[in-house]
Image: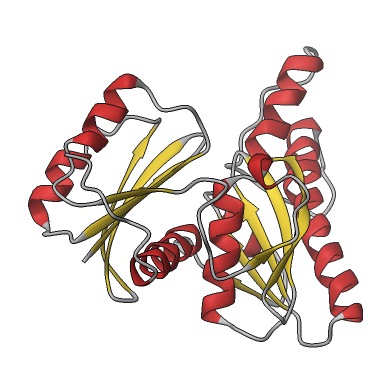
Amino acid sequence: MNLIIDIGNSRTKLVAFDGDNAADQSIAEGHSLELLAGFCQRHTFSAAIVSSVIDLTPEACEALHQLPCPLLTFAADTPTPLHNRYRTPATLGRDRLAAAVGAATLLPRHSLLIADMGSCITFDFVSDRGTFVGGNITPGLHARLRAIDEFFPRLPHVDTDGDLPELGYDTPTAIRAGVVRGIIHELNGYIDFYSRRYPNLHTFVTGGDADIIVRHNARHTTIDPLLVARGLNVILDYNLQRNTITTNPR
């Protein structure tokens, strides 16, 4: 069984994979690995991979050091099944590449658009030949709402809960609809653009806000909240097969 440790900007996700199947998961807000020891007590892991978009704290490093199995740290030079055409691979978010690997594994030989609705929203493209071509980054849903709070003090605070009309009928609904439906139109615009160029295009949507966006009319998509973890599991197996994991962290 593989242990997947995915540390994002706002949440940490632990996933246990038995082959290709996610057998268990645990999610915590923030970057703490306090749940790691208990998670490892529930399962016997043969190998682990950690991916982080932030610098790890000494406490987190120590928790990883205590793992009872070999650990692969996903880095810019870690081999993956995809050819990476990004010009600055060292700056490419590990989560973006992992999600691309996950999507390409679920649907090989297709042109793929991967939209990650997290703290930042990313739109990435993978060719039908298995090449990560690149993508775009834009502020996420909550970042956009916070920006309105910060830069426009006369406007009210608005969150995602509440009515979402096509056109706002008061200021709170105008802000909510402007942000949420703006992202929906943004996603649909990417889908329409790439569908015209690549008839076999398929779109995967992942990230903490994926459900909010897709349930309000983003079309032709597959939601997979575990897409990054699936990709990390594939990357771990890929490196195990290549014998590139040779040391035990203990």
- Give the residue drawn at x 62%, y 54%: 116
In this orientation, which residue lies closer to the viewer: 63 or 184?
Answer: 63
Q: Is residue 144 visible?
A: yes
Q: Position of residue 200 (x, y in %)?
A: 76, 87
Could you tell me which quadrant the N terminus lies in?
bottom left
**Figure check: 176 above or below 80:** above
Furthest-left residue in this view: 41
Percent position (x, y) of residue 223? 55, 68
Q: Is residue 215 visible from the viewing direction of this image? A: no
* Colour mapping: secondary structure
- The percent coordinates of residue 95 (x first, y second) are 55, 50
On screen, 210 above or below 18? above
**Between 76 and 246, which is closer to the camera in this rendering?**
246
Please, is residue 191 above or below residue 48 in the view?
below
Quadrant, the C terminus: top left
Q: Residue visible at 51% across and 45% down?
A: 75
Q: Return the residue nearer the eye: 94 or 13.
A: 94
Task: Say left or right for 32 vs 184.
Answer: left
